[in-house]
Image (cartoon, rainbow, N blue to C red):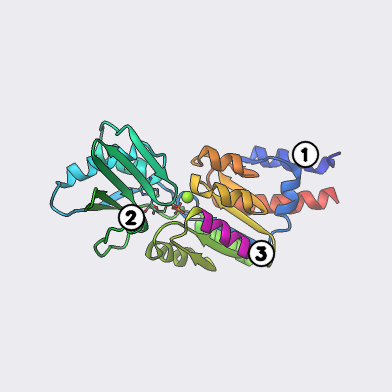
Amino acid sequence: SIPLGYFGGIGAGSRRGILVKGGEYLDVLAEVDTVVFDKTGTLTTGRFEVTDVATNGELTIDELLRLAARVEMASTHPLAKAIVEHAGPVLPFTMIKEEPGYGLMAIDGEDRIYVGSARYVQKLGYPIPAETSGTIVHIVKNDRWLGRIELRDQVKPDAKDTIQALKRYGYQTVMLTGDRQKVAVAVGSAIGIDEVRSELLPHQKVAEIERLAETGKVAFVGDGLNDAAALARADVGLVMGGVGSDAAVTAADLVLMNDAPRDVVEAIELSRRTRRIVW
Ligand code: ADP
Ligand code: MG
């Protein structure tokens, strides 16, 4: 039987937009030592704006953007949404494969078009020019680098206060991201998080969770398709419910409907109160 206190805790959470999938998850949350965050869409808004476009001269800037958008139409990634919005209406390619944490590949007749991270392009064997400071999406066609799109989003307004509150409570705070080190370090130092790990593929996020779990209980907070495995592996998984991918929402134990980092603190406080009532 489930102690009555859990129903109280679950009910109080749901009135605040914190949905708990079962009383046992409140119990684990009350015992957590380390709180790990994804960056994009979790600590930052995930609403990107295109801030710069560079081409190798073969296509115009507009042509490059439209080509990228024809590929990104197949993706629900925040970068994809921003590129499609910026380029305006285009016809999507029909044969597209997405590689989480890397990007996408489209087949157009004889042509292969790749849209994604520097690591993706390098994995395919293409050298890429020196980079700027934002989040970068590269475009490669067959054996040629055609250009890159630089995008930026904003740190969520309550991200810094959330990290500071968690640190005051004595939690270790960590950020894991697939984005570039430069962007990750800038966000990490803006909010004062203890530890930053960047340029991680989805399975490397899981490995980081496992490393942290060796010394204590771990909560992971994420939103994307690329976070689903880490959400499942953590002792307790929390997902940004408004922007989160279906796979991430399914893998999580708690759903934060307001997409606000501060609700992580709220959920932890709720778990501690519930525990006092249950015991
Ligand atoms: P995060 O962990 O910050 O949520 P991801 O793992 O989703 O980041 O992505 C890591 C990097 O891979 C992105 O910064 C981008 O360069 C590239 N990437 C991933 N998905 C896409 C996509 N749909 N279109 C273009 N680039 C992508
Ligand atoms: Mg994310």
Prevailing SS of the magenta stretch: helix
Q: Position of residue 240 (x, y in %)?
A: 54, 45
Identify the residue at horizontal 29%, vertical 34% (top origin): 93
Q: Tell me if mark 2 has few (under 14), some (14-19) or many (20+) residues whose alpha carbon lies within 10 angstroms of its own.
A: few
Residue behind label 1 places its C-beta within 8 angstroms of ligand 2: no
Residue 124 - label: 2
Amino acid type, residue under disc 2 in the picture: Leu
Identify the residue at horizontal 86%, vertical 51% (top origin): 279
Q: Position of residue 97 (x, y in %)?
A: 38, 40
Amino acid type, residue under disc 3 in the picture: Tyr
Amino acid type, residue under disc 1 in the picture: Phe
**Separation of residues labelled 3 and 1 (CA atoms):** 25 Å
Whether residue 204 appears in magenta in the rendering, the answer is: yes
Identify the residue at horizontal 39%, vertical 39% (top origin): 75
Question: Mark 1 or mark 2, which is nearer the start of the sequence?
Answer: 1
Between 104 and 131, the one lying in front of the other is 104
Residue picked out by circle 3: 169
Q: Tell me if mark 1 has few (under 14), some (14-19) or many (20+) residues whose alpha carbon lies within 10 angstroms of its own.
A: some
- Number of on-image labels: 3
Residue picked out by circle 1: 7
Question: Mark 2 or mark 3, which is nearer the start of the sequence?
Answer: 2
Identify the residue at horizontal 29%, vertical 38% (top origin): 107
Query: In this rendering, would 207 be left or right of 53?
Result: right
